[in-house]
Image (cartoon, helix red, strand yellow):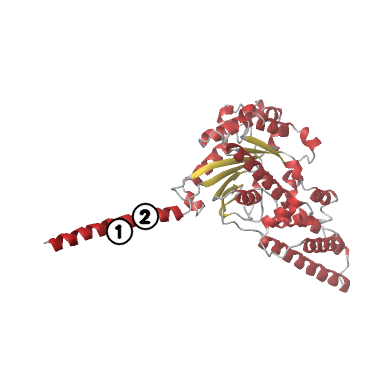
Amino acid sequence: MWVINLIMKNLKLLRTTIALLFVLMTLQWQAAEPAKKKLQIFILAGQSNMVGHANPHTIATLLQSDDARDKRLAQMIFKDGNGLSQKALSEHLVRARKIDGLTGGISNEKTKAMKPGPEKTALEAEVKKLKEAHEAFKNKILSACAVSDQVYIASIADGNKGSGPLTVGYGGSRDKIGPELSFGLSMAQKMDAPILIIKTSWGGKSLNYNFRPPSAGPYKLNEKEQAAKNAADIKKNASLNWRMMNEAVHNVLKDLKKHHPKYDATAGFEMAGFVWFQGFNDQFSDEFRDNYRENMVHFVKDVRKEHKTPNMPFVIGVLGTNMTKEGVDKNAVSVAQREAAAAPEFKGTVASVESYKVYDLEARKVYDSGWAKHFAEWCVVGSDRPYHYLGSGKFFVRLGDAFAKSMIDLTQKQHP
């Protein structure tokens, strides 16, 4: 009997020892497992220059610059071993200028003026060869652009809707970019956490009417609008883009795992910041201009209320299509954007970023020299009109990076 009791005691001791070992091993595994990081969510919103109308291959003009910032941005945007260089870009520009010299630009006036014959055939063959090399280099630039595994995006850019890893193609079409690309890549260098960008942007929209925030009060129709046959629709559609923006954001928040594979529900998410880039359409009405500052203040407060984040870091991109400080200082909307960011109630939580400071002056020179006659060269540096910042990839990469720097500065003020 005593033998059986001894065995039972030993079994009990063994079970206790195994249980203790299991607990210790579990604690060790938990200690070894890295702490899960909250998904950092940034909302980007605005009108056409948040949509983005730059051809991605124009980003390569960063390689022209000897500026340390531009060199850093080129390294960030392009994959390692991309084969791009300042020399390769210079050769690309020489080729473009030769095409323009042979053809006369977008109209091909020189080619058209030639009589049919061997000389014209030889010229057309040379131009064709140059254009093929021209396109091949542009495609090389596109394939060299980074694809992030840390930053994902869910984007509405006018009719171009999409989601996935952050890379080129989330601008106004699948072959365009806006400030989202460098903003996300730059934030990834500064944050050790998964990042999700939710971009909601539509061209040609005002803050006073389309994005009008609730606390600004109901939109009041002017006399012309009151007399219009569609007056009821005008009234109904006030604040439509405000509502669409918030609907889009909430739809993404409902299924975060779908939009970022590294989202962990146990760690959760944080509404980490908001970037606003807009203002062009508020320039053309006294009412829209005069109310911009107050509307912007209401907008910031209402966004924070919507997402239950009282001090959400908020960056306002200052309209800078006037190119210079002197020109921007005279623009009532730009001034109002600065004043809203500097409102006392926003101290340390809202900042403005001057877009004119990163304007692509080199692209502007080509545009002003007569872009139509220098069409091939123009297509290397720009892809749109001045109100879209020339569709310069260099500009939008610089701007997104400036937004990211400002966002990090605000975040560090709140979490020193």
Mark 2–mark 1 contact, CB under 8 Å? Answer: no
Residue lying at 57% horizontally and 55% vertically, measured from the top left:
165
Is 309 located above or below residue 217 in the figure?
below
Q: Quadrant of residue 94?
A: bottom right
**Most distant residue in the bottom direction:** 118
Q: Nearer the viewer, residue 142 or 123?
A: 142
The amino acid sitting under disc 1 is Ile
Q: Nearer the viewer, residue 163 or 404?
A: 404
Q: Residues within 10 Å of mark 1 (few under 14, many from 20)?
A: few
Q: Nearer the viewer, residue 58 or 87?
A: 87
Q: CA distance from mark 2 to mark 1?
A: 10 Å
Residue 20 seen in the figure = yes
Residue behind mark 1: 18
The amino acid sitting under disc 2 is Leu
Residue 206: mark: none
The N terminus is located in which quarter?
bottom left
Mark 2 vs mark 1: which is more N-terminal? 1
Residue behind mark 2: 24
Residue lying at 50% horizontally and 42% vertically, measured from the top left:
250
- Relative image position of residue 251 (x, y in whole percent): 49, 45
- Relative image position of residue 78 (x, y in whole percent): 68, 59
- Relative image position of residue 99 (x, y in whole percent): 83, 63
Residue lying at 32% horizontally and 55% vertically, measured from the top left:
20
Is 78 located above or below residue 402 in the figure?
below
**Most distant residue in the front direction:** 2
Q: Secondary structure at mark 2?
A: helix
The C terminus is located in which quarter?
top right
